[in-house]
């Protein structure tokens, strides 16, 4: 009887979540109807951000106070214009800006000047990304490759607001991070519908052909790309696919250590905020492979031309993992575009682009219930939804053992044992306790 009640409650909550998502998508159509829906929404975004950021420049610089995280500024932009706002060709709408002074500080921390921010977002039409994920959100990319604008649900926007003070402290301590970098939180209101938006850093440069893309959680339950996904020109694979297709990505010792240190620090931050169900977005560019063998640049949203050079500090993968104060800018070249050099198990030269995404999922009641339900039917430790501490440990273990691996130096190889059983041989450093291994072994000279 308890099992049946759990099924009923879980189904109802799933339907509620689905209805909320549908309401957002239908709301976009209601507010901006007709075939120009996309262009109208993009225009309203640019107009609203342009107006609010422009007005913000008149406010003096000062330290961020606690109350600044909870400020919401609102302006009404009628289509005919007003004494304060310009006329436009879109339906009347109200534009809300959340924590404007706090987000201004975040942008300054990453070296984003107001003029550059406005130029990136407002100077050229935004590029709509076609079906980049399963969340149902709309994604827009700035033409210079700097920023992603994503629509989010009410609960995600609300959670980000609550997260801001802790997010502020973490960025002060660790500006080099693989966590999403939020540069603005906004809301468009029109016709009784709210469309919430976040502006974030762009992880994947369009001018680099990504031969493989992965959404990794460290989970095995249903973590394989669907048949429909695999039929796409640029599919996004999952954990089990990665294990089928790769035997790990190999980095030199310093890079591996820096990457894992960054991931460990970021996961502990997420755990402290009770965040789970996040993913590592991982893209692989094979240097010796022609573009035609991967995703065409145009299919990835680009035109094949290199955009304006990156201006945002710590915005590339290589910059994000270097926490020792090295001049990371030297690594962001035309050849690497900030990617992390690596090798495959076949000795192919690779560039790795990565970032942690989807961090606005807290372990709320609905997530606890989802885990309880799945744990009744499947192996509870294998499902993606889990308590934050367990999720972080499983995530890190998968990344440090199955995905990222350290390349052994020649000196390490020469001072190692070759341990063999009937099926396999493996290299073991002399420092390991060979007496505890239940295999027959011999030193290979």
Image: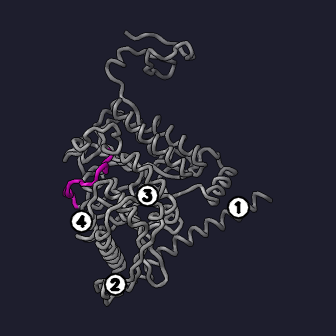
The residue positioned 35% from the left and 48% from the top of the image is 283
The residue positioned 57% from the left and 16% from the top of the image is 438
Percent position of residue 225, x then y: 47, 53
Say which quadrant the N terminus sits in. bottom right
How crowded pointer 2 is (Cα within 10 Å; few <14, some 14-19, many 20+) is rated as: some
Percent position of residue 396, x then y: 49, 40
Location of mark 4 (residue): 115
In magenta stretch: residue 313: yes
Location of mark 2 (residue): 90
Does residue 33 lie above or below 168 as drawn? below
Location of mark 1 (residue): 7
* Quarter of the image where one finds residue 330: top left
Q: Nearer the viewer, mark 4 or mark 2?
A: 4
* Quarter of the image where one finds residue 259: top left
Q: Are marks 3 and 4 in contact (CB under 8 Å)?
A: no
Location of mark 3 (residue): 229
Q: Nearer the viewer, mark 2 or mark 1?
A: 2
Q: Secondary structure at mark 3?
A: helix
Percent position of residue 337, x then y: 24, 48
Distance of label 2 from label 1 (alpha carbons):
45 Å
Q: Secondary structure at mark 2?
A: loop
Q: Are marks 4 and 2 in contact (CB under 8 Å)?
A: no
Pointer 3 or 4: first along the chain: 4
Say which quadrant the C terminus sits in. top left
The residue positioned 67% from the left and 55% from the top of the image is 373
How crowded pointer 1 is (Cα within 10 Å; few <14, some 14-19, many 20+) is rated as: some
Pointer 1 or 3: first along the chain: 1
Q: Are marks 2 and 1 in contact (CB under 8 Å)?
A: no
Q: Secondary structure at mark 4?
A: helix
The residue positioned 34% from the left and 31% from the top of the image is 254
Stretch of the chain drawn in magenta: 303-317
| Count of labels in the image | 4
């Amino acid at each position: 009887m308890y099992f049946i009640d759990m099924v009923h409650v879980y189904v109802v909550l799933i339907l509620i979540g689905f209805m909320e998502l549908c309401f957002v998508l239908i709301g976009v159509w209601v507010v901006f109807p007709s075939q120009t829906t996309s262009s109208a929404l993009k225009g309203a975004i640019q107009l609203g951000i342009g107006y609010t950021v422009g007005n913000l420049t008149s406010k003096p610089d000062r330290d961020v106070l606690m109350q600044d995280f909870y400020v919401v500024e609102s302006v009404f932009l009628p289509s005919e214009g007003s004494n304060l706002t310009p006329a436009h060709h879109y339906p009347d709408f109200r534009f809300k800006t959340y924590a404007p002074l706090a987000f201004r500080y975040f942008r300054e921390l990453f070296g984003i000047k107001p003029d550059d921010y406005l130029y990136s977002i407002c100077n050229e039409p935004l590029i709509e990304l076609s079906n980049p994920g399963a969340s149902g959100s709309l994604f827009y990319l700035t033409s210079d490759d700097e920023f992603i604008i994503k629509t989010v649900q009410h609960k995600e926007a609300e959670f980000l607001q609550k997260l801001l003070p802790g997010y502020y402290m973490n960025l002060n301590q660790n500006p080099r991070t693989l966590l999403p970098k939020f540069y603005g939180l906004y809301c468009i209101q029109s016709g009784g519908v709210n469309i919430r938006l976040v502006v974030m850093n762009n992880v994947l440069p369009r001018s680099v052909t990504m031969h493989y893309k992965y959404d990794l959680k460290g989970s095995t339950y249903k973590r394989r790309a669907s048949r429909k996904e695999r039929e796409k020109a640029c599919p996004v694979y999952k954990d089990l696919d990665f294990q089928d297709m790769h035997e790990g990505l190999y980095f030199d010792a310093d890079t591996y250590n820096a990457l894992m240190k960054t991931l460990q620090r970021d996961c502990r931050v997420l755990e402290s905020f009770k965040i789970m169900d996040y993913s590592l977005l991982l893209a692989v560019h094979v240097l010796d492979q022609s573009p035609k063998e991967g995703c065409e640049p145009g299919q990835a949203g680009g035109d094949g031309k290199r955009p304006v050079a990156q201006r945002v500090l710590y915005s590339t993968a290589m910059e994000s993992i270097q926490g020792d104060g090295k001049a990371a800018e030297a690594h962001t070249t035309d050849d690497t575009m900030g990617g992390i050099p690596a090798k495959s198990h076949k000795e192919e030269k690779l560039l790795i682009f990565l970032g942690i995404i989807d961090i606005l999922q807290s372990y709320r009641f609905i997530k606890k219930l989802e885990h309880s339900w799945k744990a009744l039917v499947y192996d509870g430790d294998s499902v993606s939804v889990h308590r934050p501490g367990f999720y972080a440990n499983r995530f890190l273990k998968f990344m440090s053992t199955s995905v990222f691996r350290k390349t052994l130096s020649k000196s390490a190889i020469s001072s190692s044992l070759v341990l063999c059983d009937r099926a396999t041989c493996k290299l073991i450093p002399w420092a390991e306790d060979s007496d505890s291994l239940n295999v027959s072994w011999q030193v290979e000279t």
